[in-house]
Amino acid sequence: MTWKPLEHFFIHFFIHCKFYRSVWMKVLDWWDIQCCLPRTFDSLLLQWSEMVQGKFQKSAWRLISNSTTWGIWLLRNKIIF
């Protein structure tokens, strides 16, 4: 991907940060999804696309995962700025 210089930031922000990891784990638990979060952001994106099966479920999962990502990003900006 073209955002390689930012990969370290994304890995920490979306995978290794304890607070945000707990948010993701609650979302996964809510969907009754058992998984281990991967070590790289690319792996996370690939894994995310295969989390659920079915057209409606995939659409709902995309909405929820994108909304969670956006909420995390807004919270981060609120804290920093």
Image: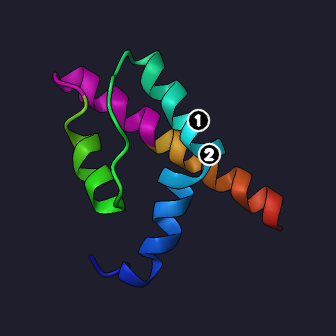
Q: Vertically, is 55 above or below 12?
A: above
Write the residue at 27% across / 22% down. Answer: 57
**Magenta part of the protein: which range?**
52-65
27 displayed left or right of 36? right
What is the image's colouring? rainbow
Crowd rating for badge 2 (residues with CA inside 10 Å; few <14, some 14–19, many 20+): few
Contact? badges 2 and 1 (CB < 8 Å): yes
68 relative to 76 in the view: left or right: left
Which residue corresponds to the image point at 68% horizontal and 53% vertical from the top-left? 74
Which circle marks residue 18 in the picture? 2
Q: Is mark 1 on a helix, strand or loop?
A: helix
Tag 1 residue: 22
Q: Percent position (x, y) of residue 40?
A: 34, 60
Q: Is residue 42 left or right of residue 55?
A: right
Label 1 environment density (alpha carbons within 10 Å; few <14, some 14–19, many ≥20): few
Q: Name the residue at 48% across, 65% down.
A: 10
Q: Magenta stretch mostly in which secondary structure?
A: helix
Badge 1 amino acid: Ser
Distance in Å between CA atoms under marks 2 and 1: 6 Å
Q: Which mark, residue 3?
A: none
Compared with 46, 22 (above or below) is: above
